[in-house]
Image (cartoon, rainbow, N blue to C red):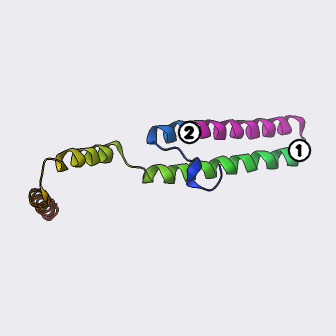
Amino acid sequence: MQDHAADLPLTRDQCRALLATLTGEVAAIKIRIAAADLERQRRRGQVDPVQFQQWRAALSDRQRQIERLTRHMSALPSPRDALKDQLIEVLRADYDDDGWRAALDKAHLRLSQRREVA
C-alpha cells in the first residue's frame, strides 16, 4: 500500500475484508519464520539471513498496513452515523427554517439535559 488515502477502501466492510486478508498474511509469514527456525534447530545450522530479512520486512510491511487501515477505518462514518445523516436529510425537507431551528434547539436542550444527568 502506498501512503495516500486513494488506495484505501471506502467502506468499513471493505476494510474488514482487507484486514482479514492482511491478518492471514501476517500469520503465514510468522509460520514460515517459525518453520525455518525449527528446521535450523533440527540441522543445528543457521537460517538464511537474506530470507529471514525478507520475511521480517514483509511482516513489518503487513503490520504497518494493518495499522494504517485500522486508523482509516476508525475515521469512516459508522452505519449509525450514515443513518443519522439520511434521517436529517429526509426530515429537513419537512421543516421551514424557523421550524428546523426550533427542532435543533429542542435537540440541543435534550442533549445538555442528558449530560447533566450523567
Q: Secondary structure at mark 2?
A: helix
Residue depth check, mark 2 versus mark 1: number of the one nearer the observer:
2
Q: Let me know if residue 31 is in the magenta part.
A: yes
Q: Compared with residue 39, is residue 110 higher up or lower down, i.e. above or below? A: below
Q: In the image, residue 44 lies at what x, y percent?
A: 89, 40
Residue under the point 81% across and 50% down:
53
Question: Does the magenta stretch mainly form a helix, a strand or a loop?
Answer: helix
Q: Secondary structure at mark 1?
A: loop
- Please identify the quarter of the rendering in which residue 115 is found: bottom left
Q: In the image, residue 3 lies at what x, y percent?
A: 63, 56
Left or right of 16: which side holds 83? left
Q: In the image, residue 45 lies at what x, y percent?
A: 90, 42
Image label count: 2
Residue under the point 44% across and 52% down:
74
Magenta-highlighted residues: 20-49
Residue under the point 11% across and 58% down:
110
Most foreground residue, 95 or 20? 95
Mark 1 is on which residue type? Gln
Most foreground residue, 67 or 46? 67
Q: Compared with residue 4, is residue 38 higher up or lower down, i.e. above or below? A: above
| Label 2 crowd (10 A; few <14 / some 14-19 / many >=20) | some
| Label 1 crowd (10 A; few <14 / some 14-19 / many >=20) | few
Left or right of 17: which side holds 86? left
Q: Are marks 2 and 1 in contact (CB under 8 Å)?
A: no
Q: Compared with residue 110, is residue 29 higher up or lower down, i.e. above or below? A: above
State the mark number for residue 46. 1
State the mark number for residue 18. 2
Q: In the image, residue 16 lies at what x, y percent?
A: 49, 39
Mark 2 is on which residue type? Leu
